[in-house]
Amino acid sequence: MALERDLVLALDAAVDAHGDELDALACDLHAHPELRFEEHHAAAAIALLLERHGHTVEKPLGGMATAFRARAGAGAGPKIAILAEYDALPEIGHACGHNLIAAGAVGAFLAAAQVVARVGGSVELLGTPAEEGGGGKIKLIDAGAFKHLDAAIMFHPFDRDVLVHPTLASTWLRFDFKGTPSHAAIAPHEGKSALTACMDTFRLVDGQRVHFRDGVRVHGYILDGGQAVNIIPETASCEISVRAGDSVELERVKAIVTRCARAAAMASDVPMELNERRGYAELVNNEALASVFGEHLARLGRDARFRDPTVGAGSTDMGDVSHVVPAIHPWLAICDEHTTTCHQRPFAEAAASPRGLSAARVAAKCLAATALEFLSSQEIRASVRAEFERAPRRGV
């Protein structure tokens, strides 16, 4: 059952009425980029805006000082959450456009909150820190913030509009090598180079790429490469990101990378210590819910592709959310195709451009309408739930 036209128009008008505030919020966050778990300015700015419009903000949440929740609607009935991200990247700031994600989510919540009583159920705004490598959504899952929800939705800026796109399961592996120092010119034969083992790890991994499935991504960098040119390096460390299409392939490739590090350590006769940082699950897109978002996007004149197999995939902790509740993560263009993409400096510029701000407003309208349509239609909720139950999901 589609939303009544007057309800849709009321949502659009509400977003437009808040438009200047949303633009200001997006620009404020863009001008004050904060790294994972340090988003104090962003969380405070969002909370202040919500409170100014009469909403109570629950903060901190899930043991995180920069996580929060606001609610609107009846306690009984279906419940849907709109998710906000607001952390930035080192050096290049909001080159993933999280300032726009935050503005779009806040706008959607403010609009939906004004009319949710007309359809029943409740809508929440969840502030989720540390998407860039910290897994704030995972911490909220562990804290039970998603247990009562029937769906979770958000959008992400990109160079094109795509409703359904995969993301990769991921993990981070840190290898620390401990060698024996010696003078590199007088007595190199008495040293054991931790750096050689570290570098050999990368060489061995490169030799194994022929055995990776399509879509697997393994990349890393050296954290510690020694102390001086005339000392055989006593310590060396590297971090390697492993990504794959699902958790099964992720475990297989992780084992290969770990064997490479062990073999490199053995070749240099140095001990190696492995530390794994929990990564993200692959995204299980709920196509029934994505289709609802797509209908509202088309209503606003944007013809999104349902899928685009020409686009590569990254990783997000929204993937973990999608394993515990039906979820969508559509992409909306803030620049022309192929001009730039996430984690590039020009993309950071696009995230504060008029086109970027306009995309956040469009996202707010579509997210609000999708949320209200989900709450109002038992048929849509049943379809969304049935698809969720059929989908292969990790036991989280």
Image: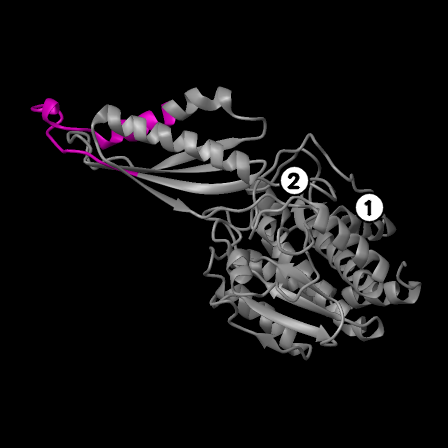
- 35 vs 73, nearest the viewer: 73
Could you give the CA–CA distance between mark 2 and mark 1, rounded to whole angstroms?
21 Å
Residue with the mark numbered 1: 302
Report the span colored magenta: 176-203
Secondary element at image label 2: loop
Taking the image as shown, residue 199 lies to the left or right of residue 31, namely: left
Residue type at the position of mark 2: Pro
**Magenta run includes residue 192:** yes
Q: Secondary structure at mark 1?
A: loop
Toward the viewer: 247 or 20? 247
Q: Which mark is residue 213?
A: none
Of badges 2 and 1, nearer the viewer stands 2
At 84% from the left and 70% from the top, the residue drawn is 119
Q: Is residue 121 magenta?
A: no
Colour scheme of the rendered structure: one colour
Examine the image and state in which quarter residue 163 appears.
top right
341 left or right, relative to 374: left
Identify the mark at residue 166; answer none if there is no mark: 2
Give the mark nearer the N terminus: 2 vs 1.
2
Residue 93 against residue 141 in the figure, above or below: above
Going by the numbered disc 1, the residue's amino acid type is Arg
Look at 26% across and 31% down and name the residue there. Answer: 195
